[in-house]
Amino acid sequence: QGHSDGKQPCKSQRLMVQTGLIQPAAPGCYHLLPRAVRAVEKLVSLIDQEMVSINGHKISMPCLTMAEAWRASGRWDLMGSELFRLRDRTGADLCLGPTHEEAVTRLLAAQGVASYRQLPLRLYQVTQKFRDEPRPCHGLLRGREFLMKDLYTFDVSERAARQTYGEVFASYRRVFARLGLPITTVEASTGAIGGKASHEFHLMADVGEDQLLSCCRCGFSINEEMMEAYMCRCPKCSGRMVASKGIEVGHTFYLGTRYSEVFGAKFCDDDNKSVTMEMGCYGLGITRILAAAVEVLSTADSVRWPGPVAPYQVCILTPKWGSKEEVAGIRMAEDLYDTLDELFPRLRRDMLLDDRGQLTLGKRLKEADKMGLPYVVVVGKRTLEAGGEFEVLRTRDGETMFLTKDGIVDLLKNVDVC
């Protein structure tokens, strides 16, 4: 079943296994199958676009990191059993990084930033992360290996760092807005990472493991772990706080000099004095975002995707073999495919022609709906009899339309594809 602690699989886990998106490999570890990989690549592309818009530079750091850096920051002991630890043949201690604050700060210190004119600097990566979860469950929502986008920022002052924090925070909101996901942002603890300020991005769901409190009056939200001092009243307006559960899909931290002081990440200011850099770190859980989106958007029986990252946008179904419509219908399906391919280059890798004519149209339509392909076009009896009208299912809302080829072109011209 792919769940190691006796819990029943949640909706996203069940649907993603049933529809061939993921396959259990080991407790907390999953194979991502072709359509899931396509969705991941699209989400990464969308995030890359946002990172470029805020002058982020993409790098790649090793997953293996030396224990000495973690000991220097104090996190080797602080992380406890959640850290995957190993020892090489020389006896040196290493770990599989759940985050890369130590590594990136040492990188900056080793590279050397000579002048304040070289700042701000914003470095990010998309890599596998590891955490030894005691009870991995719910598929990609809580695993031991996961894909994450982590961003690290370096500034000349606290004021500049807080401005950067605001820019990244806004860029994360744009990511979720483009995905059409109803995100909730909450104030949160800095935890083992440390720092001076922190916010979490949540999708509200019953399977969420974070308890959130939201004000009925002003909408202020906060992680429950931060509420001890405020009791049950909103710290902004004294309104009543209501509890709900959320899936954390993003996190932002203003770190100050928590790591830069330890590892000597400094620059020369305009008076030629050596100054410690102000840092921030920011994360988006790539695989968790996809699973959480499936969890909150899907029906009980069918996957539903955020439009821009659906594995494919359009699926065209040809007639059943041996039917009266077979020959002419296949020709019309291929003509529609070629027309869309020519008019919309961005859809060229986002269309499927389902020509498995040994299966009925009804069975293939049901499969396409269950997989959550946004637009399913049926070339059937009506297409040949009703002046070339195609049956089009928009799976997002279940609406069925009957459109000519020109109508389909008009329908798809504004589809957002990553």
Image (cartoon, rainbow, N blue to C red):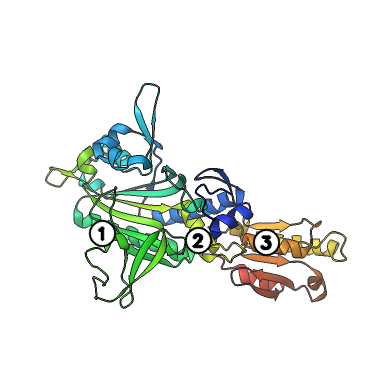
418 lies above or below 402: above
Q: Residue at x 55, y 60 (%)?
A: 11
**How many angstroms separate mark 3 from mark 1 (CA)?**
45 Å
Residue 44 visible within the image: no
Q: Earlier in the sequence, mark 3 or mark 1?
A: 1
75 lies above or below 291: above
* Badge 2 amino acid: Ala
**How many angstroms separate mark 2 from mark 1 (CA)?**
29 Å
* Badge 1 amino acid: Gln
Q: Secondary structure at mark 2?
A: helix
* Residue placed under numbered mark 3 in the picture: 368
Q: Are marks 2 and 1 in contact (CB under 8 Å)?
A: no
Q: Earlier in the sequence, mark 3 or mark 2?
A: 2
Q: Nearer the viewer, residue 334 or 229?
A: 229
* Badge 3 amino acid: Ala
Q: Which mark is residue 293?
A: 2
Q: Are marks 3 and 1 in contact (CB under 8 Å)?
A: no
- 207 relative position to 36: left or right: left
Q: Are marks 3 and 2 in contact (CB under 8 Å)?
A: no
